[in-house]
Amino acid sequence: MSQVRKIDPATFQVVMHRLWSINNEQGLICTKISGSQIITECYDFNTALMNKNGDTIFIGQYNTTLASPIDAGTKWIIEHADELGGIHDGDVICYNDPWIGCPHANDLVGITPVFLDDELICWLGLSMHEIDIGGVWFGSWGFGFPEAQAEGVIYTPIKLVEKGVFKPNIERLLLRNSRTVIVNQLNLRARLGAFNFAKKRIYETITRYGKDTVLAILEQIKDYVRGAVRAKLRELPDGSWSESLYWDHDSIENKLFEGRLTLTKKGDRMTLDFTGTSPQAKGFINCTRVGLHGDIAVALLPALFYDLPWTAGVIKDICDVVIDEGTIFTATYPTPVGGAPVQCGTLAANLIFSCLNKMLASSNKYVSRASAGWAPFNGQLMSGLQHTGLPLMGLMLDGMAGGAPAYSYRDGVDVAGLLVVLFMKLANVERYEERFPLLTLYRRRGPETCGHGRFRGGVGLETAYIPYKNPIPLREQVCSASHALPAASAGIMGGYPSSNNLQNIARKTNVMEFFAKKQIPVHIDELNWERFEALEAKADVFIDGTDVWHLVVGGGCGYGDPLDRDPEAVRRDVQDDIYSIGTAKNIYGCILDPETLEVDLMATEEQRQKIRAKRLEEGKLVSEIVKKD
Amino acid sequence: MAKYNVSVDVGGTFTDCVVMDEKGHTSIAKSLTTPIDPIKGVLDATLIAAEQRSISLDDLLKDTVRFIHGTTVGTNALTERKFAKVGLITTKGFRDTIHIGRMSSRFIGKTVRERLDWAPLVNPPHIISLDYVVEVSERVDMAGNIVVELNVEEAEQAIETLARKKIEGIAICFLWSFLNPTHEQKVKQMVFSKYPHIFCSISSEIAPVIGEYERMITCLLNCFVGPLLATYCANLERALREKGYRYPLMLMKADGGITTVEEVKAIPIVTLDSGPAGGTIGGRRLSRLYNRPNIICTDVGGTTFDVSLVAGSELEYDPEPNINQYSYTLPKVLIDSVGAGGSSIAWSDRGVLRVGPTSAGSNPGPACYDRGGEQPTVTDADLVLGYLNPDYFWGGRMKLKKEKAEGAIKRIADELNMSLIDTALGIRKVVDAEMADLTRRCTMERGYDPREFTLLVYGGSGPVHAWRYTEEAGVKEVIVLSNSSVFSAYGMQRAPEIYIANKSRPLIPPFTAATFNVINTTCAEVRDRIYSLFEARGIPKEEIRLRVFLFARYLLQSHEVMMEIPEVLERPLTEADIGMLQERFHATYEGIYGKDTALVGGGIEFMTFRAEGTREISLPPEPKATEGPQDASRALKSQRKAYFEEYGGFVPCNVYDGDKLENGMVLEGPSIVERMGDSVVIPPHVRGEVDQYLNIFLTRKEGS
C-alpha cells in the first residue's frame, strides 16, 4: 500500500473514479449507436481501459468474457507494432482472431492508443459481438463443420483508422463477407463514437491533474486492487476444491464433454488445474486459451472483486493455470471455436465459479457471498425474412433468461440472466413482434425450473410462439446445453443443479382453432399436434404455419440440502406454481394437503427421514452415473 | 386590491412557501412538513408567509389569483407502500410480465458501484400480488389488427374476480393496445357500467407507447396513487376555498408544467416525483431572465446531489424514468442524482479515502450536530476547514460542535495515516469530484460542452462547494441564488402549463404516400389531444406554443433520437420530405454521438410521435434592487481563518453578512458570505459580484 501514498488518497480516489467512469461511459455510448439487438439488449460486448503495457485496468459492466482477452490482443499489437507500420495517435486497430485476443471470431475488437505529446498514455478497447462475419451459415456458427474456416473470416490486427484518417477500403474489407453489413457498419461507427468520447474525457483528466499523476495512478490502481484481493485471499482458508461438469453436443456428435477443475488455494495465490478435461471437440463448442483467460475473469471478478474496480490485469498475479494444449478449453487452430463464449467458455466459468463458491462457503467471514451456479445459455438464432420482406437475423434473448443462483442465506432471483452478462434486459414482447415475424402465445416464469435446495435457485423463463406473417419459413439454429443432462452448472453444499434447458417444436398444431374460439392456449399441453420434436442441444430446423416453438430456460442452482428447506417456504413455492406438490414430497420431503396446501409437519419429518435412509443406501458419485465413451 | 401568486412545495423536512404580489415582491416562509396530514403543513407555511405581510391567511387567499402546489403524496405512498388495492387485467399469457420485470428490476436505478456488488441485488418487493392479476383472451398484432377477438365472458369473470377482492382500482393493459385500443376501451366500459366507483385506467390512454412492461407499470402506478391523490387534491382545494381562495388549485407535474385538479384526477401519475422539477423550471426562468440559454441546475441537499439541465432554454426529459426499481414511461424532467451531500459519511477503504453513498441524514446528522452522530461527514469537514460558522448555522438557530467534528475526522485520519486538516481537505475534494463527475456526465454524455453553461446552485450545502465542483466540471460561471433555500417553490411560480402527448406508431421504409398519410394523421392526433386539454381549461389556441417531435432511429437500432418536425404544423408532409427528415436525423445523431457516427445512406425508421403544448404564465418581473456601492465593506461582518489550498493553509478572510449585500457589491476571494440557510465560499482566485436581483455571480478573477 506504500506506493498509493505517493499520491494523496483523495486525488487517487478522484482520478481512479473518473477513469473508471470514462470506461463505463464508452460502453454506454456504444449501446446507443449500435443497431444490433445483441449489443443494445443482450449487452454482448465490453470495454477495456489498459495501461501503456496493455494490462487491463478497468473493464466495463457488460459481457465479461469479451473484455478480459482484449489485453492479450493489445499486447500482440504492441509486439507486432512494426508490421502494422508503427502505433500512432489516432490509430484504430481491428481484429477478430480468437487465438490473438477474443473468445470467438464474431467478436470484432477495436483498439486505440491514447497519446499525449507523442507519449503513449493508455489503450482503449471495445469488443462487440457481430451477428455475422461470414462463414457457411448465417450467424457464423459453423454448425456441423470441424474447422474454424467454416465460421467466417478471421482478421488478424489491421488498421481501420490510421493517424486519424478513416480507411474506407479497410471498412469494405471488414464488411465484405458479412451478411449483416448495415449492422456491422453501425457497430464500426459505435466503436469510433465511443473512442472519440473516451479520449476527449481522458485528455480533460490529464489537463486537470497532469500527465505524470494520471500515469502514476494507472499503475497504482493495479497495486491497490492486487493488494486488496491478496488480503482477501489470505483471509480465506487454504485448501483444494474440485468440480466436474458436463456439456452436451458439439453439433457433430451428441455426446458429453467433461470439464474438470481442482482449485488449490495457498496463502494469497490460487492454482486452477484443469487436468482431466476432455480433448477438443470436433464441432464449434471449444474455446481457445485466450478465451479461457476471459472465462476465468467471468468467475473470478464477481466472486472476489465485488467491492473493487474490475482490474482484470491483476488476475495473472494471483492465479496460475495448469492445462494441456488441445482440450475443449485450449483448442488449437484450426479447431472450430465459434460457440466458445456460450459453450465451453461457460463450462469453464461455471467450474471456476463453483470451486470459488465452495472456497467462500468454507469461511465464516465470506459464507454470505457464496452462491450456487447459474443456468447455462439456452440460445437460438433465428433467420429468415421480416414481415416486410427485409432480411432477418437475430438472437432470441428469451434463451438467456435463466434464474439466478441461490445463496447461503436466500433464494435466487427469478428470471435474472446469465453469469457472463449480469445486467441484461429482456426485450418487451412488442419489441420482438415489431421486428421478428412471430406471435408470442405466452411468456412466464417456468414451473419446475429452479435448482432445489435449502435455498432454491430462481426460476427460468418459459415461452411459446408461432411464426406470424413470415414470408418464408423461419430457420432456428439451437445452440444450447443441458438438454441431455442438467450437469453444466452445479448446486453446492447439497443443492441441486437447475432443470434441463428445453427447446421443442409442436408441428402443425390446432392453435388457429383456439384463436377462432376467442381463446389463447397458455400451456403447450393444451394444444393438439401432428408431431412433437424435443430438440437436442444443437439443432438446425425450420418452422412455419401453425408450428409452435416452445422454450424453457433452466433456473439457478440450489444451495444446501432441500430436505433442510423450511416447510413454510416449500408451501409458498407450491402456491406460487414454482413446483408441484409431488416435487415438494419427493425432493423436499414435504407433505402438503392437496386442498389447503397446509404442511403436515409429522408426515414431513417422516418423509425426510425416509429419503435420508434411501440416499445412504443408493448414493453414487456423478462419475459413476455418467457413462463415458 | 393585491393579487398574489402563492406556491407551496412540500419536502421531506420543510414545507416551503413563496408569495409574490402584483409588483413582483416576494416573501418566503418555511414550516415543518406534517407527513400525516400534509395539508396542515401547507396551510402553516402559507400562514407564516401571510404574517410576514401582516395580513391574515384568509385575506391572503382571498386575493390570491393562483395557488400552485407541489406534492409528494404519491411518491411517499409508493415508497411506503401505502397505496390503493388494485387489480390488473392483461392479455392471456402475460400475467407474469410485472414479476419478470424485463429481467432487470433488481438493478434498475442502481449506480455502477452498487451493480458491481451484485450478490445483494434482489428484485424490489412485488408491487402487485399475482392473485390480483387476471388474464383475458384477446390479441392484437404489430400492425394493430385484431388476431383474437376480446373474450367478453372472460372479461366479465375477470372483473368479478377482482371486485370480490374489494379492489379500489383496476388497471387494464393489453398487448399492442397503443395501436388498437378497442379491447381496453371495451373492458373499461364494462367496469364502469357495473362498478362506477372503481377507479379504472387503461394503458392506451395513460401511455400509448410501445413496450408492454413499462406501459403496464405506468398504468398500474396510476391506479395505485390515483384515488389517494384525487382525494388529497380535492381536500386541499376545499380547504383553500374555505379560506377564501376562488381559482382552480394548480398542481406541479413531473414534466415541469402545472395542471388543474381535474386533470390530476384523470391521470394522477403526472404528479409523481414532481417536486425537484420546480428547481429546473426556476432554472429555465433564470435562463431567460439572464439571457443564458444553457443552465445546469444543481441542488445539494443533505444526502443527494441532483443535476438537471436547461439547454437552449428548453427542458430535458428522462427517457427511462423509474421509481423504486420499476421503470415507467411518462414525460418527466430528467434529473440525475448521486449520493453525495452535506451528511455523506467519509470512510477509509483499505487506505483509500471514500465519501458516501451512506449518509448520516438529518438524524443523527453530522458529528458536529452533537446528536449522537460519530462518523465524519462533509459538513464536519467544512466546519474544520473554517467554511462554516459554528455559531451562525441556520442563522444561529443551531450551534455546531467543532471538537466533535475534529474527533470524528481524526479517527479516519489515523487510519489513512494523514493529518486532520489533510483529511478534511481530502473529504472536500472527493465529494467535490463526485459532484463534478455527475455534472460533467450530465452535459458531455448528452453531447453538450460544459464550458457553454452557467451553473445554478441551490440547496443547503451547495454554496460552500459550488465553485470547486463547478471549476472541476469545466463550467465558467456560477450563480448562487439569493433564495436558494426555497428555490423549488420559486420555480413553481414560473412553471408554464405544459401538456405532452405521445403516440407510438412504428414505421419503416419504404416511405410511401400511405406512410406519410399515417405520419400526418398521427401528428394531428397528438396535436389535437393537446388542443383539447387546453380547450378544457378555456385557453385559446393562440396562447399555446405547440411543437411536434419525432423519435427515430437507424433501421434495427433500439434507442431512438428525438428530433423536431415543425413543418408538420404548417402543412402535411409528403414523400418529397423524406430527404429533409433523413438529413435532420443524421445531423441530430452526429450532434449527440460525434463525428463519423451517423450512417448516411443507412435506412431510418420512425417510432413515436410527440406533441408538446406550452402556455407561459405572465407574471410581474422580478423587482430590481437599487444600485449600491461596489465596495462591500458595508456588508462586512467579521474576519476569520479558513483553509484554501491555493495558500497551502489557513488564511484570514472577510466574512460578509448575506442580508446586507447590495446590488453591485464586489466580493473578492478569499471570502465567505454567511446567509440565513447557507455559507457561500469564494476561493482566492474567484470574484463574486452581487447583481440587481441580489444573486451572487462567481467567476474566475482575470489573470488568475
Image (cartoon, coloured by chain):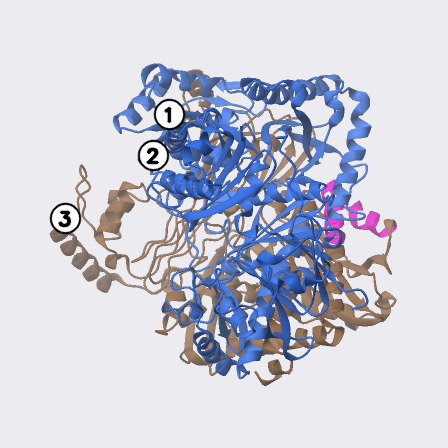
Q: What residue would you read off at disc 1?
A: B199
Location of mark 3 (residue): A600
Which residue is more in the foreground, A250 or B258?
Answer: B258
User: What is the spatial separation of the Cα atoms under label 3 and label 1, in whole angstroms?
Assistant: 42 Å
Q: Nearer the viewer, mark 3 or mark 1?
A: 1
What x and y, as percent, mark residue B94?
43, 32
Q: Position of residue A111 (x, y in %)?
A: 75, 61
Measuring from the top left, give residue A616's x and y in whole percent: 23, 64
- What stretch of residues is rendered in magenta? A169-194
Chain given the colour brown: A
Q: Gap between marks 1 and 2, in whole Å? A: 10 Å
| Residue A501 in view, yes or no | no
Q: Which residue is mark 2?
A: B84
- Please report contact status of discs 3 and 1: CB closer than 8 Å, yes or no: no
Q: Give the distance between the C-alpha atoms of the residues marked 2 and 3, in whole angstroms.
A: 36 Å
Residue type beneath disc 1: Phe
Label 2 and label 3 in one chain: no
Which mark is first along the chain, 2 or 1?
2
